[in-house]
Amino acid sequence: MKLKSDWLFSILLVTATLATGNLAARPNIVLIVSDDHGTDALGCYGNPIIKTPALDSLAADGTIFTDANCTTASCSPSRSVILSGLHNHRNGQYGLQHTFHHYQSFDDIKSLPVALSENGYRTARIGKFHVAPESVYQFDFVLSAGAANDPATVGRSPWEMAEQSRTIIEGDDSEPFFLFYATDDPHRSNAFTPDGLPTFDTYPKPNRFGNRDEGYPGINPVTYDPEKVVVPPFLPDTPACRAELAEYYQSVSRLDQGIAHLLDILKRSEKYDNTLIIYISDNGVAFAGAKTTLYEPGMRLPCIVKEPSQTMKSRTQDALVSWVDLAPTILDYAEIDPTNMKTHGRSFRKGVSGNLSGRNEVFASHTAHEVTMYYPMRVVKNRQYKLIFNIAHGLEFPLAKDLLQSPTWVSMQKQGLEFYGKRTPKALLYRPRFELYDLESDPHETVNLSDDLKYRKTRDQLMVRLREFQEETRDPWAVKWERE
């Protein structure tokens, strides 16, 4: 009997050891989400002026995706997609998170942090959150948070964010961790009026993008000469715009220094090699023509992925990926059955160190930014063409307050400029029902081909595919194909 008991005990011990070993062997995961950062302001994406050595080094250790797309170019909606893997019309977060008029996700959504926690991960978040309800996007630990975009909040101090993340990184090694590190940088700064409403009005001075004269702990400010910044083609080359881009660059460089500290903590704790690190942004830069639009500067974003013990480094991947793919990709690396979550995406893990085939298109949408800014749009994009369905095309496109009050926009209006970048202001604000662009010959989306007979077949094929997507995903706005 004793021999049999000893044998049984040994089997149980080995089984438990193997289970624990497998759990510990699964990678740690760090998902870094910046706020309003486009590919226009990263050294590893080709900007010769901006200083982003930490993100450049992460890219050197990993893979850059050159056609990674958010599904909506607005903060809360995009973050809800990142954490749920579902398009907004299925997760319920249609616009900026406002519980008093129910701009929050449905209660029955299962999110990425919940799925990871249920499967043996310690989950923690720090910095900007801006989704709800908490019961849906539940983390085991909330390290620190604060008022969104406030220079006094921890989300504006990425070095402090990294320092506070030590408790998770250097903590219990018996379970892998998932860290959601979400900065407020490089979002525009806001102040508050006496009645408590946010304002971004700094004209004629540039918005500071979170920069402040007293600086931030652990940060050596990097300042830029407005005359030397690179003005993207979608923006006007004006002194006001250049001054704002210089502030934006400084905010990005601060963000980069915080990430440098985070990477250093991972390396010193000997966890860097066994950590999946993903860097993305929620949407494009906070200028009219990017953020809240589904033009390329708004939805085509940085995506840098460093695999655990990645052997093929400094890779560039041009495969189409979408933010609905992030949750399935992370579950894939965590060795968790993807059916743990219902998502609209698929893992792009194979594309990090190899080839990724099979996806020919991505979809995007926008319903509202702030609750009063209703302007639903739906988009299908393939490797060459993009079709935009402006469902509310009879309305003026509502600029978000931080864009409308930006010195770049205000100075353009005061000067009466005919063009705002490649578009006229009128073209930006008043849009036709459909927009069709050839992204190969017209990467800045200036020539609308939707009424060109030569492209009628292409347009009609994309219209069919977009409608199919809306019906497949039960988009309430699909009815507009027949009733508009």
Image (cartoon, rainbow, N blue to C red):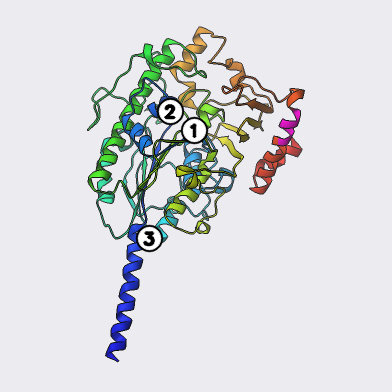
Quadrant containing the C terminus in the rendered view: top right
Which contiguous range is marked in magenta? 456-461
Residue pointed to by mark 1: 66
Q: Label 2: how many residues lie within 10 Å, few (<14), some (14-19) or many (20+)?
A: some
First reached walking from the N terminus: tag 3 or tag 2: 2
Q: Is residue 187 left or right of residue 433?
A: left
First reached walking from the N terminus: tag 1 or tag 2: 2
Q: Label 3: how many residues lie within 10 Å, few (<14), some (14-19) or many (20+)?
A: some
Residue pointed to by mark 3: 120
Look at 53% across and 25% down and name the residue there.
Answer: 399
Residue pointed to by mark 2: 45
Cα distance between the residues tagged 3 and 2: 35 Å
Q: Secondary structure at mark 2?
A: helix
Cα distance between the residues tagged 1 and 2: 8 Å
Instruction: Tell which residue pokes out farthest to the top in this image.
Output: 415
Q: Label 1: how many residues lie within 10 Å, few (<14), some (14-19) or many (20+)?
A: some
- Mark 1: amino acid: Thr
Look at 45% across and 11% down and name the residue there.
Answer: 238
In the image, 244 versus 12, the foreground residue is: 12
